[in-house]
Each structure stands twice: as C-alpha cells, then as structure tokens.
Amino acid sequence: MRRMGIRPPEFLINWVYYQRLPILHRAYLEINRALKRVGKKPSLQDTPAERTASLISAIPPTSAAAERLLAEYHTSVYSPRQADVEAARKAGSDIRYLSWMAWLNRILKRFQEPDRDRSG
C-alpha cells in the first residue's frame, strides 16, 4: 500500500505489528485485551503479575489459564529455560474465550428484566 502511495489504515498497521510478535508475547497480550473487555484497562506501570491478579479478580474462571500464561511468560523472560509456547498459546486462547463470554454476559444482563414479586 505504501509503495502505491496509500497510507494503510491504523488497524492494518496494528495487525501487522501483532502478527510479527513471538507467539508467547501475543498470548500474553490476551491478558491486557481481556482486562479491557471487562472495563478494567491495565495501567502502564502494572506488572505482569498485577495484571494477572486483576484479570483473575475480574473473571475468576480465567484463573488456571492466566496463572499458566504468567508462568510461561516469566520462564521466557527470567529463566534460561525455554517456555512452553504451545501451553502459553492455549492459555491465551482460553483467556480470550472466557473474557468474551464475560463480556457477552455483561451485555446480556443489561437486557434482563428485574425480578418482580409475583405474589402481590
């Protein structure tokens, strides 16, 4: 697009950047995205552990996947051992699914009728 003199749309630039990231980093970004989906945008100074704790607090079913992803991320960053990239990818996928379900439930609750006392 740029060769043709066309400025690519921002979403396309972001997508290309995202696709170039290592799989483990893409998986870790699911924590941030999940937090945004439930209205808890992480602060820039939050550590990975703080973001994970915030996600688990907001969406408790993500606990196992989030802790696994954090462990693999820590292994990748702070250990001479290789992280299990497939486990991280799976955990990221689970977090994505669970956070979308939480988002959908939050939206659907807006349309539910309040309980009424039918005995009256």
Image: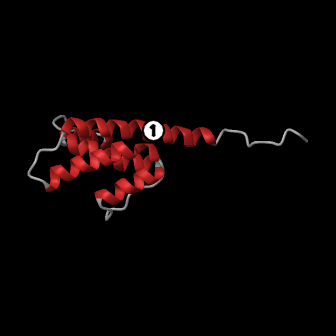
What residue is rendered at 50% in x and 41% in y? Answer: 102
Which residue was labeled with disc 1? 100
Q: Which quadrant holds residue 15? A: top left
The amino acid marked with disc number 1 is: Trp
Q: Is residue 3 above or below residue 32?
A: above
Residue 18 in the image, given as x and y percentages of width and height: 24, 42
Q: Is residue 111 visible?
A: yes
Q: Is residue 7 visible?
A: no
What residue is rendered at 29% in x and 35% in y? Answer: 90
The residue furthest bottom is 45
Residue 95 in the image, given as x and y percentages of width and height: 37, 41
| Pointer 1 local density, CA inside 10 Å: few below 14, some 14–19, many at least 20 | some
Q: How many marks?
A: 1
Kind of element beneath mark 1? helix
Q: Is residue 73 above or below residue 118?
A: below
What residue is rendered at 43% in x and 38% in y? Answer: 98
- Figure quadrant of the N terminus: top left
The residue furthest left is 80
What residue is rendered at 35% in x and 48% in y? Answer: 31
Q: Which quadrant holds residue 62? A: top left
The residue furthest front is 64
Nearest the camera: 103 or 20?
103
Nearest the camera: 30 or 54?
54
Q: Which quadrant holds residue 64? A: top left
Colour approach in the figure: secondary structure
- Figure quadrant of the C terminus: top right
Nearest the camera: 23 or 65?
65
Residue 14 in the image, given as x and y percentages of width and height: 27, 43
